[in-house]
Image (spheres, grey):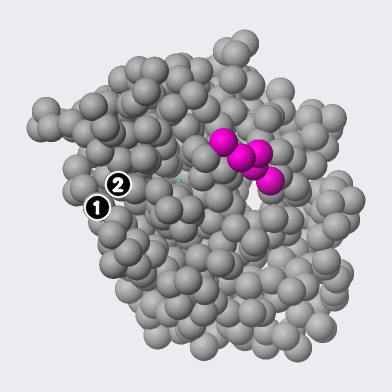
Amino acid sequence: MANQYDVAIAGSGIVGMSTALWAQRRGLQVAICDANAAGSGATFGPACTMATYACVPINSPSVVTSLPSLLFSKNSPLTVNYWYAIKNWRWMLSFLMNCRSSRVEAIGTQLGALLREADAGLDPLIEEIGAEDLIVEEDCLYVWATKDGFKDARQGIELRRRQGVAMQEIGPDEIRSLEPNLKMPMYRGLRFQGTRYILHPQKLVERMQNHFMRNGGTVIEKAVSSVEAAAERVTVHFHDEDTLTSGHFVVATGAHGKSIKGAGVESLPLGVERGYHVTFANHRNKLSRPVGWAEAGFYATPMELGLRFAGTVELDALSAPSNPNRITYLRRRAKEMFGQLDGPSEEWLGFRPTMPDALPVIGPSQKSERIIHAFGHQHIGLTLGGLTGRMVTDMVTGQAPNPDASGLSGKRFGFL
Ligand SMILES: Cc1cc2nc3c(=O)[nH]c(=O)nc-3n(C[C@H](O)[C@H](O)[C@H](O)COP(=O)(O)OP(=O)(O)OC[C@H]3O[C@@H](n4cnc5c(N)ncnc54)[C@H](O)[C@@H]3O)c2cc1C
């Protein structure tokens, strides 16, 4: 029996759609399955930075030393549901173990290798679908309001330097000359040279999907319920008992991978960092580039829909309701940053898929070489989505991925 497709992909976020396009470019017959609209998951609401400088993992020694203020200050970008943390103690413990300096260096080195190749993974797709109008070339900026905050960031800045990130340290006057509308206190800034951002990520992914369909790709508007791998094929099951067969199956479901039985995600420590955004439709002109307020844990980005404040981290279950305090926090900090703004026009909660070592999972499942995992991109999935698609396609076609992916498969968590 011939397989219906060479590759079936679950999930039409930036990772799944990029994989679909790369596989199609190599002449493969591809189906992508998702009950929801393309780009409507985590990919809908990010801070829109193509953050090729973001090789510093969220795990860091300063997370441990600053834990009391991170947990209890009203100005903290982090909130934790303690019951959730206790229930998921193994993930939390593993996250903390990865905050050791030696681990941070190793993780930063692996992220650096991925990020140096990130543009080469996304740019051919941008060109192919004609989405250059959605990309803005403008140096992103980090701003620290306090001397202590900047001191805590020193180790991370040195790590970036070792990874070859092009950046320039600037003082308050230069920050103000670049962005005169900023009103919060300023101590130092970092200007990341040669960086870009995306005006509308969902539009980007929708265009990817339209192009994919025009070129003969199949879109199946259903969620995958389970998969079974055999020697020659993978059988993909949907909730309505329909099935399809394909040579390979790719799990690109972001934070939701455990919803697919038999794909080998159930036994992996896939966690979720919930993040929020508020968008002020009338204030796009307040900035000319994304500005990350380091201590406050979010970016303000002048995107197509307005001025978006996106970030913060909430450790809680996927199923927990949206937390209104997090929206209040973003609105209050937005006011500190710019003064009174009218709005917001939009509030959003999204789910970053996160492994406790802050590295994505890109590689074959422990269940079968025919099932390939592609999730766990935490804070930089928009940046790494294109490259992940290329790496997964290399695996499907038997080529060696660049950069080397041997340390990225889920098998690295064998001890858990
Ligand atoms: C507040 C915030 C700010 C961020 N800022 C940035 C940034 O500036 N730069 C950056 O690079 N990254 C950023 N990120 C991270 C980035 O958004 C994510 O890493 C990325 O979008 C993950 O993409 P994905 O394709 O893996 O997942 P998603 O976009 O979540 O897509 C997963 C898809 O899988 C589908 N699905 C789920 N279950 C099934 C199933 N059983 N069968 C089929 N389909 C299924 C879902 O419907 C969804 O469409 C940010 C994230 C947040 C929350």
Can residue 114 be seen here? The reply is: yes
- In percent of width and height, residue 153 lies at 80, 51
- Does any portion of residue 294 appear in the rendered image? no
The answer to whether mark 1 is within 8 Å of ligand 1 is: no
Q: Amino acid at mark 2?
A: Ala
| Extreme residue in the left direction | 240
Circle 2 SS class: strand
Could you say which disc has been placed on residue 168 in the image?
A: none
Name which of mark 2 and mark 1 comes first in the sequence.
2
Q: Which residue is mark 1?
A: 219
In the drawing, does residue 88 fall left or right of residue 246?
A: right
Look at the image and tell me in which quarter the N terminus lies.
top left
Measured from the top left, where is residue 306 in percent x and y? 42, 79
* Quarter location, residue 235: top left
Q: Which residues are magenta?
A: 398-402
Which residue appears at 81% of the width and 77% of the height?
A: 172
- The image quadrant where one finds the C terminus is top right
SS label for mark 1: strand
Point out the residue furthest to the front here.
1
| Contact between labelled residues 1 and 2, with CB atoms less than 8 Å apart | yes
Q: Is residue 403 above or below residue 294?
A: above
Q: Is residue 401 magenta?
A: yes
Magenta stretch secondary structure, dominant:
loop
Q: Is residue 64 above or below residue 139?
A: above
Mark 2–mark 1 Cα distance, whole angstroms, equals: 6 Å
Q: Position of residue 15 (x, y in %)?
A: 46, 50
The amino acid type, in three-letter code, at marker 1 is Val
Depth check: give the residue in front, 3 or 174: 3
Looking at the image, residue 71 lies above or below residue 286 = above
Q: How many marks?
A: 2
The yes-or-no answer for disc 2 within 8 Å of ligand 1 is: no
The residue identified by callout 2 is: 31
